[in-house]
Amino acid sequence: MTGELGRASPTARVVICVISYRRPQGLARLLGGLDRQAFVRSPIPDLRVLVVDNDPEGSAEAVCAAARTNLRVPIDYRLEPRRGIPFARNAAVRHVGASADFLAFVDDDEVPDPTWMDELLFTQVRHQADVVSGPIVPHYEDPPPAWIVRGGFFQRERQPSGSSLTVARTGNVLIRTSLFQAMDTLFDERLALTGGSDTHFFLRVWRAGFKMVWADEALITEWVSGARLTPAYVLRRGFRTGNTRGLYERDFGRARGQRGVGVLRATWWIAKGSFLLPPSLLVGRHAVIRAVRGMCAGAGYLAGRAGVRFEEYRTTNGR
Protein backbone atom coordinates (compact mmCIF):
# COMPACT_ATOMS: atom_id res chain seq x y z
CA MET A 1 0.00 0.00 0.00
CA THR A 2 1.70 3.18 -1.20
CA GLY A 3 0.72 6.79 -1.43
CA GLU A 4 1.54 10.34 -0.42
CA LEU A 5 2.64 10.16 3.20
CA GLY A 6 2.79 13.89 3.89
CA ARG A 7 -0.89 14.74 3.86
CA ALA A 8 -2.23 16.21 7.10
CA SER A 9 -5.52 14.34 7.33
CA PRO A 10 -7.02 11.95 9.88
CA THR A 11 -6.34 8.32 9.06
CA ALA A 12 -9.56 6.62 8.02
CA ARG A 13 -10.12 3.19 9.53
CA VAL A 14 -11.52 0.91 6.82
CA VAL A 15 -12.53 -2.73 7.00
CA ILE A 16 -13.11 -4.47 3.67
CA CYS A 17 -15.64 -7.26 4.19
CA VAL A 18 -15.69 -10.29 1.92
CA ILE A 19 -18.56 -12.78 2.14
CA SER A 20 -17.25 -16.08 0.80
CA TYR A 21 -18.97 -19.35 -0.05
CA ARG A 22 -16.93 -22.17 -1.58
CA ARG A 23 -14.89 -20.08 -4.02
CA PRO A 24 -11.31 -20.72 -2.86
CA GLN A 25 -9.64 -19.67 -6.11
CA GLY A 26 -11.76 -16.54 -6.38
CA LEU A 27 -11.11 -15.61 -2.75
CA ALA A 28 -7.34 -16.00 -3.14
CA ARG A 29 -7.44 -13.88 -6.29
CA LEU A 30 -9.47 -11.19 -4.52
CA LEU A 31 -7.19 -11.07 -1.47
CA GLY A 32 -4.22 -10.54 -3.78
CA GLY A 33 -6.04 -7.62 -5.40
CA LEU A 34 -6.85 -6.08 -2.02
CA ASP A 35 -3.18 -6.29 -1.06
CA ARG A 36 -2.23 -4.24 -4.14
CA GLN A 37 -4.29 -1.19 -3.21
CA ALA A 38 -2.43 2.11 -3.74
CA PHE A 39 -3.33 5.58 -2.50
CA VAL A 40 -2.62 8.82 -4.33
CA ARG A 41 -5.82 10.90 -4.16
CA SER A 42 -6.59 9.95 -0.55
CA PRO A 43 -4.47 9.64 2.60
CA ILE A 44 -3.37 6.07 3.28
CA PRO A 45 -6.06 4.49 5.47
CA ASP A 46 -5.78 1.99 8.27
CA LEU A 47 -6.91 -0.89 6.07
CA ARG A 48 -8.00 -4.35 7.21
CA VAL A 49 -9.80 -7.26 5.56
CA LEU A 50 -12.53 -9.35 7.17
CA VAL A 51 -13.52 -12.62 5.48
CA VAL A 52 -16.84 -14.04 6.65
CA ASP A 53 -17.07 -17.67 5.56
CA ASN A 54 -20.66 -18.74 4.88
CA ASP A 55 -19.67 -22.37 4.33
CA PRO A 56 -20.41 -24.41 7.49
CA GLU A 57 -17.37 -26.55 6.62
CA GLY A 58 -15.10 -23.48 6.83
CA SER A 59 -13.57 -23.89 3.38
CA ALA A 60 -12.24 -20.29 3.30
CA GLU A 61 -10.16 -20.60 6.46
CA ALA A 62 -7.21 -22.31 4.75
CA VAL A 63 -7.21 -19.66 2.00
CA CYS A 64 -7.02 -16.89 4.60
CA ALA A 65 -4.26 -18.67 6.51
CA ALA A 66 -2.19 -19.04 3.35
CA ALA A 67 -2.76 -15.41 2.38
CA ARG A 68 -1.49 -14.14 5.73
CA THR A 69 1.94 -15.63 4.99
CA ASN A 70 2.62 -13.48 1.91
CA LEU A 71 0.22 -10.51 1.97
CA ARG A 72 0.75 -7.25 3.82
CA VAL A 73 -2.88 -6.34 4.52
CA PRO A 74 -4.18 -7.79 7.83
CA ILE A 75 -6.79 -10.50 7.30
CA ASP A 76 -9.34 -11.55 9.89
CA TYR A 77 -11.50 -14.66 9.48
CA ARG A 78 -14.95 -15.38 10.89
CA LEU A 79 -17.32 -18.28 10.29
CA GLU A 80 -21.07 -17.71 9.86
CA PRO A 81 -22.56 -21.21 9.49
CA ARG A 82 -26.15 -20.07 8.90
CA ARG A 83 -26.57 -20.34 5.15
CA GLY A 84 -27.53 -17.12 3.40
CA ILE A 85 -25.66 -13.96 2.50
CA PRO A 86 -27.65 -11.56 4.75
CA PHE A 87 -26.66 -13.66 7.79
CA ALA A 88 -23.01 -13.26 6.77
CA ARG A 89 -23.34 -9.55 6.00
CA ASN A 90 -24.96 -8.90 9.36
CA ALA A 91 -22.25 -10.91 11.09
CA ALA A 92 -19.65 -8.69 9.38
CA VAL A 93 -21.40 -5.49 10.47
CA ARG A 94 -21.70 -6.70 14.07
CA HIS A 95 -18.08 -7.83 14.18
CA VAL A 96 -16.75 -4.50 12.86
CA GLY A 97 -19.04 -2.42 15.08
CA ALA A 98 -17.47 0.93 15.93
CA SER A 99 -13.89 -0.27 15.39
CA ALA A 100 -13.82 1.31 11.91
CA ASP A 101 -15.01 4.51 10.27
CA PHE A 102 -15.98 2.76 7.06
CA LEU A 103 -16.98 -0.71 6.04
CA ALA A 104 -16.63 -1.82 2.41
CA PHE A 105 -18.16 -4.87 0.78
CA VAL A 106 -16.74 -6.78 -2.18
CA ASP A 107 -17.63 -10.23 -3.54
CA ASP A 108 -15.37 -13.27 -3.70
CA ASP A 109 -15.66 -13.53 -7.50
CA GLU A 110 -14.30 -10.00 -8.01
CA VAL A 111 -10.93 -8.24 -8.19
CA PRO A 112 -10.55 -4.48 -7.53
CA ASP A 113 -8.34 -2.14 -9.52
CA PRO A 114 -5.29 -0.95 -7.52
CA THR A 115 -6.92 2.49 -7.12
CA TRP A 116 -10.33 1.14 -6.11
CA MET A 117 -10.30 2.08 -2.43
CA ASP A 118 -8.44 5.31 -3.15
CA GLU A 119 -11.26 6.41 -5.46
CA LEU A 120 -14.01 5.38 -3.03
CA LEU A 121 -12.44 7.35 -0.19
CA PHE A 122 -11.72 10.36 -2.40
CA THR A 123 -15.34 10.46 -3.57
CA GLN A 124 -16.64 10.02 -0.03
CA VAL A 125 -14.68 13.03 1.22
CA ARG A 126 -15.46 15.15 -1.82
CA HIS A 127 -19.23 14.63 -1.50
CA GLN A 128 -19.43 13.93 2.25
CA ALA A 129 -21.37 10.81 1.39
CA ASP A 130 -22.62 8.10 3.71
CA VAL A 131 -22.47 5.47 0.95
CA VAL A 132 -20.26 5.34 -2.14
CA SER A 133 -20.74 2.72 -4.85
CA GLY A 134 -18.79 2.02 -8.03
CA PRO A 135 -18.89 0.04 -11.26
CA ILE A 136 -18.46 -3.69 -11.77
CA VAL A 137 -17.31 -4.84 -15.21
CA PRO A 138 -17.22 -8.45 -16.41
CA HIS A 139 -14.17 -10.59 -17.10
CA TYR A 140 -15.13 -13.86 -18.74
CA GLU A 141 -13.18 -16.88 -17.55
CA ASP A 142 -14.10 -18.63 -20.81
CA PRO A 143 -14.62 -16.99 -24.22
CA PRO A 144 -18.26 -15.81 -24.15
CA PRO A 145 -20.75 -16.75 -26.85
CA ALA A 146 -21.51 -13.98 -29.33
CA TRP A 147 -25.07 -13.61 -28.03
CA ILE A 148 -23.76 -12.83 -24.53
CA VAL A 149 -21.61 -9.98 -25.85
CA ARG A 150 -24.24 -8.63 -28.25
CA GLY A 151 -26.92 -8.74 -25.57
CA GLY A 152 -24.75 -7.07 -22.92
CA PHE A 153 -26.25 -9.39 -20.31
CA PHE A 154 -23.38 -8.87 -17.85
CA GLN A 155 -22.90 -5.16 -18.45
CA ARG A 156 -24.11 -2.84 -15.70
CA GLU A 157 -25.18 0.78 -15.99
CA ARG A 158 -22.59 3.43 -15.14
CA GLN A 159 -22.95 7.09 -14.18
CA PRO A 160 -20.73 10.15 -13.82
CA SER A 161 -18.87 10.31 -10.51
CA GLY A 162 -20.80 12.20 -7.87
CA SER A 163 -24.19 11.21 -9.23
CA SER A 164 -26.80 10.69 -6.53
CA LEU A 165 -28.05 7.15 -5.97
CA THR A 166 -31.26 5.73 -4.59
CA VAL A 167 -29.89 2.20 -4.31
CA ALA A 168 -26.56 0.36 -4.19
CA ARG A 169 -25.20 -3.18 -4.15
CA THR A 170 -22.62 -4.85 -1.94
CA GLY A 171 -20.40 -5.95 -4.83
CA ASN A 172 -18.66 -2.56 -4.74
CA VAL A 173 -19.61 -0.22 -1.91
CA LEU A 174 -18.16 1.86 0.92
CA ILE A 175 -20.42 2.60 3.92
CA ARG A 176 -19.98 4.93 6.87
CA THR A 177 -20.23 2.58 9.87
CA SER A 178 -22.27 5.03 11.95
CA LEU A 179 -25.05 4.54 9.40
CA PHE A 180 -25.69 1.01 10.66
CA GLN A 181 -26.44 2.28 14.16
CA ALA A 182 -29.18 4.50 12.77
CA MET A 183 -30.99 1.71 10.90
CA ASP A 184 -33.70 -0.21 12.72
CA THR A 185 -32.72 -3.44 10.96
CA LEU A 186 -29.70 -4.48 8.88
CA PHE A 187 -29.78 -6.87 5.91
CA ASP A 188 -33.14 -8.65 5.77
CA GLU A 189 -32.55 -12.28 6.72
CA ARG A 190 -35.87 -13.31 5.18
CA LEU A 191 -34.03 -12.94 1.86
CA ALA A 192 -31.30 -15.40 2.85
CA LEU A 193 -31.29 -17.44 -0.37
CA THR A 194 -33.27 -15.23 -2.74
CA GLY A 195 -30.69 -12.47 -3.15
CA GLY A 196 -31.64 -8.81 -3.12
CA SER A 197 -31.07 -8.16 0.59
CA ASP A 198 -28.50 -5.49 -0.36
CA THR A 199 -30.96 -3.69 -2.65
CA HIS A 200 -33.60 -3.93 0.08
CA PHE A 201 -31.20 -2.48 2.66
CA PHE A 202 -29.94 0.43 0.55
CA LEU A 203 -33.46 1.43 -0.47
CA ARG A 204 -34.20 1.76 3.24
CA VAL A 205 -30.97 3.73 3.68
CA TRP A 206 -32.04 6.14 0.95
CA ARG A 207 -35.54 6.46 2.40
CA ALA A 208 -33.93 7.27 5.76
CA GLY A 209 -32.26 10.31 4.17
CA PHE A 210 -28.64 9.17 3.92
CA LYS A 211 -26.51 10.44 1.04
CA MET A 212 -25.41 7.88 -1.54
CA VAL A 213 -23.20 8.74 -4.53
CA TRP A 214 -21.47 7.04 -7.44
CA ALA A 215 -17.68 6.79 -7.97
CA ASP A 216 -17.16 5.78 -11.59
CA GLU A 217 -13.37 5.47 -11.25
CA ALA A 218 -13.64 2.98 -8.35
CA LEU A 219 -13.53 -0.02 -10.65
CA ILE A 220 -14.02 -3.68 -9.81
CA THR A 221 -13.81 -6.61 -12.23
CA GLU A 222 -16.18 -9.56 -11.82
CA TRP A 223 -14.88 -12.94 -12.96
CA VAL A 224 -17.78 -14.55 -14.79
CA SER A 225 -17.57 -18.34 -14.86
CA GLY A 226 -18.54 -20.39 -17.90
CA ALA A 227 -21.47 -21.82 -15.93
CA ARG A 228 -23.17 -18.42 -16.18
CA LEU A 229 -22.83 -18.12 -19.95
CA THR A 230 -26.04 -20.00 -20.73
CA PRO A 231 -29.58 -18.95 -21.63
CA ALA A 232 -30.86 -20.82 -18.56
CA TYR A 233 -28.70 -18.75 -16.21
CA VAL A 234 -29.59 -15.42 -17.87
CA LEU A 235 -33.32 -16.18 -17.79
CA ARG A 236 -33.18 -17.50 -14.23
CA ARG A 237 -31.36 -14.35 -13.15
CA GLY A 238 -34.04 -12.26 -14.88
CA PHE A 239 -36.76 -14.07 -12.95
CA ARG A 240 -34.84 -13.73 -9.68
CA THR A 241 -34.22 -10.01 -10.19
CA GLY A 242 -37.91 -9.45 -10.81
CA ASN A 243 -38.81 -11.66 -7.87
CA THR A 244 -36.66 -9.79 -5.35
CA ARG A 245 -37.95 -6.47 -6.66
CA GLY A 246 -41.49 -7.71 -6.11
CA LEU A 247 -40.60 -8.82 -2.59
CA TYR A 248 -39.14 -5.50 -1.48
CA GLU A 249 -41.82 -3.43 -3.22
CA ARG A 250 -44.31 -5.59 -1.33
CA ASP A 251 -42.76 -4.05 1.78
CA PHE A 252 -42.40 -0.48 0.48
CA GLY A 253 -45.18 -0.03 -2.07
CA ARG A 254 -48.06 -0.39 0.34
CA ALA A 255 -46.81 2.55 2.41
CA ARG A 256 -46.76 4.75 -0.68
CA GLY A 257 -50.19 3.69 -1.88
CA GLN A 258 -48.70 2.29 -5.08
CA ARG A 259 -49.62 -1.37 -4.79
CA GLY A 260 -50.97 -1.47 -8.35
CA VAL A 261 -48.17 0.44 -10.09
CA GLY A 262 -45.62 -2.37 -9.91
CA VAL A 263 -48.15 -4.96 -11.02
CA LEU A 264 -48.99 -2.88 -14.09
CA ARG A 265 -45.29 -2.42 -14.83
CA ALA A 266 -44.61 -6.15 -14.58
CA THR A 267 -47.61 -6.90 -16.79
CA TRP A 268 -46.15 -4.46 -19.33
CA TRP A 269 -42.77 -6.28 -19.21
CA ILE A 270 -44.52 -9.56 -20.04
CA ALA A 271 -46.62 -8.00 -22.79
CA LYS A 272 -43.63 -6.19 -24.28
CA GLY A 273 -41.53 -9.36 -24.29
CA SER A 274 -44.34 -11.29 -25.94
CA PHE A 275 -44.68 -8.58 -28.59
CA LEU A 276 -40.94 -8.44 -29.29
CA LEU A 277 -40.39 -12.19 -29.35
CA PRO A 278 -41.56 -12.95 -32.93
CA PRO A 279 -39.52 -10.19 -34.65
CA SER A 280 -36.53 -10.95 -32.44
CA LEU A 281 -36.28 -14.35 -34.12
CA LEU A 282 -35.11 -12.45 -37.20
CA VAL A 283 -32.62 -10.29 -35.27
CA GLY A 284 -30.64 -12.97 -33.47
CA ARG A 285 -30.34 -15.14 -30.37
CA HIS A 286 -29.45 -12.22 -28.13
CA ALA A 287 -32.68 -10.43 -29.04
CA VAL A 288 -34.73 -13.55 -28.38
CA ILE A 289 -33.20 -14.05 -24.95
CA ARG A 290 -33.59 -10.36 -24.11
CA ALA A 291 -37.31 -10.53 -24.92
CA VAL A 292 -37.81 -13.71 -22.90
CA ARG A 293 -35.76 -12.29 -20.02
CA GLY A 294 -38.16 -9.35 -19.82
CA MET A 295 -41.06 -11.78 -19.59
CA CYS A 296 -39.25 -13.73 -16.87
CA ALA A 297 -38.60 -10.53 -14.90
CA GLY A 298 -42.27 -9.63 -15.07
CA ALA A 299 -43.34 -13.10 -13.97
CA GLY A 300 -40.79 -13.06 -11.15
CA TYR A 301 -42.06 -9.68 -9.96
CA LEU A 302 -45.66 -10.87 -9.83
CA ALA A 303 -44.56 -13.96 -7.92
CA GLY A 304 -42.69 -11.76 -5.46
CA ARG A 305 -45.69 -9.49 -4.92
CA ALA A 306 -47.66 -12.65 -4.15
CA GLY A 307 -45.08 -13.57 -1.51
CA VAL A 308 -43.32 -16.35 -3.47
CA ARG A 309 -39.56 -16.42 -2.83
CA PHE A 310 -37.29 -17.79 -5.57
CA GLU A 311 -34.15 -19.06 -3.80
CA GLU A 312 -31.54 -18.77 -6.54
CA TYR A 313 -28.64 -18.93 -4.09
CA ARG A 314 -29.13 -22.52 -3.01
CA THR A 315 -26.32 -23.15 -5.50
CA THR A 316 -23.21 -21.11 -6.30
CA ASN A 317 -21.18 -20.54 -9.47
CA GLY A 318 -17.46 -20.15 -9.90
CA ARG A 319 -14.39 -21.57 -8.20
Image (cartoon, rainbow, N blue to C red):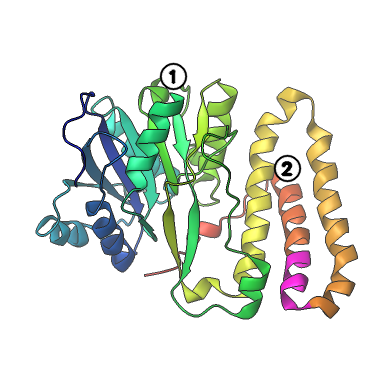
Seen at 53% across and 50% down, the residue is 195
Quick check: marks 1 and 2 in contact, CB under 8 Å? no
Q: Is residue 318 visible?
A: yes
Residue to which mark 2 is pinned: 305
**Mark 1: which amino acid?**
Ala
Q: Quadrant of residue 207?
A: top right
Where's the C terminus, which quadrant? bottom left
Q: Residues within 10 Å of mark 1 (few under 14, many from 20)?
A: few
The answer to which of 202 and 3 lies nearer the viewer is 3
Tell whether position 285 is magenta. Answer: yes
Helix or strand or loop: what does disc 1 sit on?
helix
Tell whether position 124 is magenta. Answer: no
Q: Which residues are magenta?
A: 284-292
Say whether disc 1 or disc 2 marks the residue closer to the N-terminus: 1
Seen at 43% across and 51% down, the residue is 219
Q: What kind of secondary structure does the magenta stretch mostly adopt?
A: helix
Image location of residue 159, percent across then percent down: 58, 44
**Mark 2: which amino acid?**
Arg
Seen at 62% across and 64% down, the residue is 153
Image location of residue 19, percent across then percent down: 35, 50
Of badges 1 and 2, nearer the viewer stands: 1
Helix or strand or loop: what does disc 2 sit on?
helix
Image location of residue 260, percent across then percent down: 83, 35
The answer to which of 57 and 166 lies nearer the viewer is 166
Residue to which mark 1 is pinned: 182
Q: Residues within 10 Å of mark 2 (few under 14, many from 20)?
A: many
